[in-house]
């Protein structure tokens, strides 16, 4: 299963490049349009040799349309042939492990050998929404129980509960009970040290959310590597980082898009979530001093500009972190600009035009 994890660096890229798709919905746009952009983006990513395309679970956020990763991934699987597809991630405390095993067993049956199961322990939303999802107000239990939930999910995927276990006669289907088959590799996702250490101890690949927790990136990756124990899945650590990057033909165009994304994040963090504003709205917005400081800090962790500037920034980030793979998320207002950004990054790294299968 190692080949399912370790991708191939193409063109002049120092490591494999992948896509993290938040399925953003811009002001004046619809969820239908955002999901159509995801299909277009997955086809571009496949054609240009990006290694994987992941979607992330979010809830009660008007600016994203990715509340149901398994549903989106099934649709993307129907429109692609070889790119790896996965969750970045499924927030495990929101779901029964059996349900996740069944969903991703179904995806594996749709697209054998192409599915990744990335798992997080955060709710992917605010506390009130998490309570509505989980039908409980004891939200800390979900995070604290994450290792046990992970172990249960793994046993459902492998269909190997021991005799006498209360779930020994329960089978996740589609799954191994129906015949020998592979199953999606599990990744752990994180923005702090907890999942980094757990991924290392279990010998799992680790994906760190550099795009919204940049200060913790190097400490978390160091902890992962120090904690790593070889497993049947991996003999050496494999760390991927999510990075926010936006390329445009002109640097000013890229700046306008990331400013729109920053305003959307500011509104989210201050309890005013909404659709991603237009670049014009972001430019005209009257930022207070505190809001400007937030936006400046947010933009400092985004790699944006011309294709050459983005390539240089990504190369520098890779050198600083030693990441084995870069997963790029492009958050702006318009789907066309987002797709164009990935195309320009592919050109900057001379990624090949691969033939359609």
Image: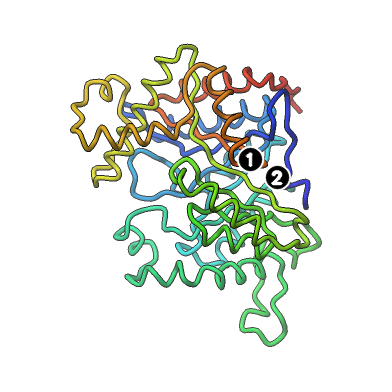
What residue did someone put label 1 on? 77
Asked if 87 appears above or below 127 in the picture, the reply is above
Asked if 194 appears above or below 36 in the picture, the reply is below
Q: Nearer the viewer, residue 2 or 32?
A: 2
For the residue carrying disc 2, how many other residues have a C-alpha within 10 Å: few (<14), some (14-19), or many (20+)?
many
The location of residue 272, given as percent across then percent down, is: 24, 43
Q: Nearer the viewer, residue 178 or 130?
A: 130
The residue depicted at 48 percent of the width and 55 percent of the height is 192
Which quadrant holds the C terminus?
top right
Q: Looking at the rendering, which quadrant does residue 63 occupy?
A: top left
Instruction: Give the left or right position of residue 26, taking residue 251 as reference.
Output: left
What residue did someone put label 2 on? 114
In terms of sequence position, does the residue under pointer 1 or pointer 2 come before the other? Answer: 1
The location of residue 5, given as percent across then percent down, is: 71, 47
Tell me whether the residue at label 1 lies in contact with that at label 2, contact meaning CB atoms closer than 8 angstroms: yes
The residue depicted at 52 percent of the width and 22 percent of the height is 341
The residue depicted at 56 percent of the width and 67 percent of the height is 97
Element under disc 1: helix
CA separation in Å, label 1 and label 2: 9 Å
The residue furthest right is 180
The location of residue 200, given as percent across then percent down, is: 65, 60
Q: Nearer the viewer, residue 1 or 44?
A: 1
């Amino acid at each position: 299963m190692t080949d399912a994890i370790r991708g191939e660096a193409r063109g002049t890229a120092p490591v494999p490049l992948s896509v993290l798709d938040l399925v953003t919905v811009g002001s004046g746009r619809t969820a239908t349009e955002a999901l159509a952009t995801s299909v277009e983006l997955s086809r571009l990513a496949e054609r240009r040799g990006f290694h994987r395309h992941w979607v992330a679970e979010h809830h009660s956020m008007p600016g994203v349309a990715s509340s149901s990763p398994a549903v989106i991934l099934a649709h993307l699987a129907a429109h692609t042939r070889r790119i790896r597809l996965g969750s970045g991630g499924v927030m495990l405390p929101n779901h029964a492990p059996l349900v996740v095993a069944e969903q991703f067993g179904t995806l594996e049956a749709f697209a054998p050998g192409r599915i990744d199961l990335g798992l997080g322990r955060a709710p992917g939303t605010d506390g009130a929404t998490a309570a509505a999802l989980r039908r409980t107000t004891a939200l800390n239990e979900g995070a604290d129980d994450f290792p046990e939930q992970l172990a249960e999910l793994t046993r459902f995927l492998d269909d190997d509960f021991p005799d006498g276990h209360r779930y020994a006669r329960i089978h996740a289907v589609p799954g191994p009970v129906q015949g020998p088959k592979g199953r999606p590799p599990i990744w752990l996702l994180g923005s702090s040290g907890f999942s980094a250490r757990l991924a290392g101890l279990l010998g799992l690949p680790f994906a760190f959310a550099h795009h919204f927790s940049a200060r913790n990136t190097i400490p978390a990756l160091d902890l992962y590597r120090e904690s790593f124990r070889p497993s049947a899945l991996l003999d050496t650590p494999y760390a991927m980082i999510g990075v926010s990057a936006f390329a445009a033909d002109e640097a000013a165009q890229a700046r306008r898009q990331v400013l729109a994304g920053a305003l959307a994040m500011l509104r989210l963090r201050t309890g005013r979530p909404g659709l991603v504003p237009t670049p014009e709205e972001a430019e005209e917005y009257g930022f207070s001093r505190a809001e400007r400081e937030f936006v400046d800090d947010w933009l400092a962790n985004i790699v944006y500009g011309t294709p050459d500037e983005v390539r240089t920034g990504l190369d520098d980030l890779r050198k600083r972190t030693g990441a084995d793979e870069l997963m790029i998320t492009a958050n702006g207002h318009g789907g066309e600009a987002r797709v164009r950004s990935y195309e320009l990054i592919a050109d900057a790294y001379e990624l090949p035009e691969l033939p359609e299968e």
